[in-house]
C-alpha cells in the first residue's frame, strides 16, 4: 500500500460519517459525485482517495453505502474498540472524558491519570482518576493503546516520555506545545489556538 | 497574493510559535534549516511557505527572529485582538472558556451564548453567559468577529444559521457535524474524534 497522507485519512473519516448519514436515511447506493458534494471536495478527489485501497464499487453504478462504510471503517480501525486514557484532569481533560463522540466511534476512555491528590481516587463523568505515578503499571495491565495528553504545556513533554516508556504507541496531544516522540510512536498535535488562527488569517486578509 | 493552502497557514502558526520560543531564549537569527528542524518539515518547505509573502531574510544570513515573528503575526492577524464568543455552555464550551491559549494569542472570549435558563446570567471561568435569543442584538453591538460552536450535533446547523444572520464571518465548529455556511463565511470544523481516528488508522495498519 502506498503511503497515505494525513489529509486523505481525514477525508476518509468524513466519507465514513457521510456514509453513516446516508445509511441512516435508508440510502443504498452513492456516487463519488454525491459523496464529494456532501464533503465539499471534488469527485476526482473522492475517487483518488478510495483508489489507495483498491477498487470499491463499479463504474457507473456507484458504491454500496454499507460496504463502503465498512471498508473505510476497517481501514480507519473503526471495526474494533480501542482502550484510551486521558492524562490531565483539568478543564480540557474533563471535557474530553465527557465527549460522547469518542465512545460512539469505538474509543473507550478507560481512566484518567493526574498528579493532584485531590483528584486521584475520584471519578469524572464516570471515568476513574488514577495517580500518574502508576502509568508504567496500569498502561500495560489495561492494554491501553492511545493516550490523550491534556496537561499544561510545561509538563507535556515529560508526560509524553512517561507514556512512551509505559508502551503507548499513539498520542493525541492537546497541550499547546509540539512534542517529540521516538520513531514508531504516532502523535497528533491538536492545538485549538492554531485552528482559530486560520480564521483570523482569513478575516485579516479580507480587511 | 496567491491562494494560500490551509496547511501553509497551519505551518505559519507553528513557525510563529517556534520563533517566539527562540526569542524567549534570546536567539536573534534563525535559518530555514533550524525552523524546519523545530517544526518537523523540510527547509525547502519553510522557504516555500515564507515565499508566499515575499522575501524575508537574506540568503545565507537567515531570518531575524523578531522581524519574522512580527511579519508572520501580521499575516495571521495576531498583531491585533479579536472578539470571540462561544455558543454552548456544555463541557466543551466551558473548557474552551478557560483555555488560556486563546487569550494569549489575542482571541478574547467576550461571552457565551446558551439557551438553558439555569446557565443564562451566570459566569463560567469569568465569562458571562447570555441568552442565545439575543445573538442578533449582542453580536453586532459587541463587534463579535469569530464564533466557536460547542453545541450538540443536532442543533449545530441552526446555531450556525443564527450566527451568520447576526453577521458572524468566521466559525470554529466543535460540533461533530459538517456545517453549511454561505460563501464569504469562513468555517473550520474541529472534530476531535476524526483526529483520534488518524491514530487508530496508524495503529491498525501496523497490526
Image: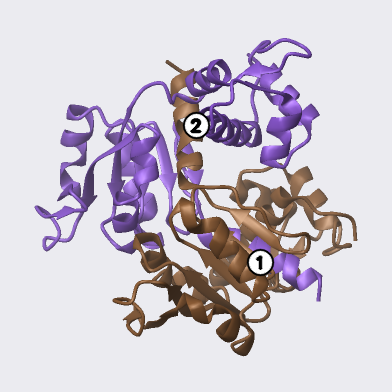
Chain colours: A purple, B brown
* The C terminus of chain A - image quarter: bottom right
Query: Could you tell me if residue A102 is visible in this image?
Result: yes
* The N terminus of chain A - image quarter: top right
Mark 2 and mark 1: Cα distance apart in space: 30 Å
- How many neighbours does mark 1 have within 10 angstroms: few (below 14), some (14-19), or many (20 or more)? many
- Where does the image place residue A28, in percent across and percent down from the top left? 59, 20
Tag 1 secondary structure: strand
Q: Nearer the viewer, residue A149 or A192?
A: A192
Q: Residue furthest left?
A: A121
| Residue depicted at 54% across the width and 23% down the height | A69
Chain bearing mark 2: A
Q: Nearer the viewer, residue B171 or A96?
A: B171
Mark 2 vs mark 1: give the one in front.
Answer: 2
Q: Which residue is mark 1?
A: B170
- Where does the image place residue A96, in percent across and percent down from the top left? 34, 52
Chain bearing mark 1: B
- Where does the image place residue B131, in percent across and percent down from the top left? 44, 79
Q: Is A45 rendered above or below residue B142?
A: above
- Quadrant of the image occupied by residue A72: top right
Q: Which residue is mark 2?
A: A24
Query: Could you tell me if residue A184 is visible in this image?
Result: no
| Residue depicted at 43% across the width and 53% down the height | A174
Tag 2 secondary structure: helix
| Residue depicted at 33% across the width and 26% down the height | A81
Amino acid at each position: 500500500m502506498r503511503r497515505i497522507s494525513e489529509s486523505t485519512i481525514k477525508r476518509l473519516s468524513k466519507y465514513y460519517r457521510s456514509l453513516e448519514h446516508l445509511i441512516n436515511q435508508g440510502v443504498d447506493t452513492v456516487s463519488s459525485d454525491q459523496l464529494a458534494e456532501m464533503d465539499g471536495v471534488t469527485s476526482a478527489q473522492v475517487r483518488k482517495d478510495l483508489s489507495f485501497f483498491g477498487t470499491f464499487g463499479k463504474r457507473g453504478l456507484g458504491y454500496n453505502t454499507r460496504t463502503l462504510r465498512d471498508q473505510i471503517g476497517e481501514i480507519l480501525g473503526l471495526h474494533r474498540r480501542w482502550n484510551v486514557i486521558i492524562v490531565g484532569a483539568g478543564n480540557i481533560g474533563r471535557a474530553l472524558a465527557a465527549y460522547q463522540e469518542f465512545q460512539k466511534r469505538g474509543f473507550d476512555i478507560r481512566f484518567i491519570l493526574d498528579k493532584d491528590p485531590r483528584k486521584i481516587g475520584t471519578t469524572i463523568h464516570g471515568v476513574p482518576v488514577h495517580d500518574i505515578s502508576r502509568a508504567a503499571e496500569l498502561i500495560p495491565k489495561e492494554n491501553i493503546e492511545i493516550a490523550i495528553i491534556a496537561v499544561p504545556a510545561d509538563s507535556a513533554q515529560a508526560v509524553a516520555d512517561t507514556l512512551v516508556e509505559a508502551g503507548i504507541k499513539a498520542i493525541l496531544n492537546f497541550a499547546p506545545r509540539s512534542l517529540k516522540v521516538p520513531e514508531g510512536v504516532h502523535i497528533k498535535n491538536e492545538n485549538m489556538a492554531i485552528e482559530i488562527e486560520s480564521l483570523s488569517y482569513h478575516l485579516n486578509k479580507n480587511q
